[in-house]
Image: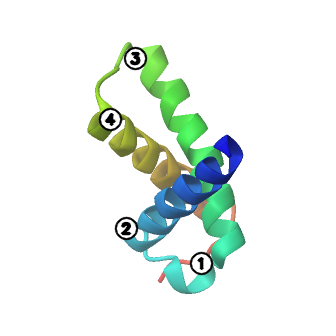
Amino acid sequence: MGWIVSLIIGGIVGWLASIIMKTNAQMGIIANVLVGIVGSWLGFWIAGMLGLDGGTIVRFLIAVGGAVLLIFILRALGVFKKA
């Protein structure tokens, strides 16, 4: 059951990040889930390095921020085109 919740939350995080970065039209559900999960990991890794921690809302914002950063990196590598 835990991995299903991770996929759902990852999809939501990736979808929100794709809206923020204006790549929503270029990404499908699988890309949203992958970007959400990998981006969350990236965000939590960076937050841990900076010593940031918080409640549920702060952790969700860190996950979305990590996904936005991942889309930025992927855009720089040419995976996504600028809107």
State if disc 1 and disc 4 touch (CB < 8 Å).
no
What amino acid is labelled 1 in the image? Lys
Q: 10 Å neighbourhood of mark 3: few (<14), some, or many (≥20)?
A: few
Q: Between label 2 and label 4, give the one nearer the viewer.
A: 4
Give the mark, 3 or 4, whose residue is nearer the N terminus.
Answer: 3
| Residue in the picture at 37% in, 35% down | 59
Q: Nearer the viewer, mark 1 or mark 2?
A: 2
Characterize the local packing of mark 4: few (<14), some (14-19) or many (20 or more) Cα atoms within 10 angstroms. few
First of labels 3, 1 by sequence position: 3
Q: Is residue 47 visible?
A: yes
- Label 4 belongs to which residue? 56
Residue highlighted by disc 1: 81
Q: Which residue is mark 2?
A: 20
Label 2 crowding class (10 Å Cα cut-off): few <14, some 14-19, many 20+? some
Q: Which mark is residue 34?
A: none
- Report x, y in % for residue 76: 60, 60
Comes first in the chain, label 2 or label 3: 2
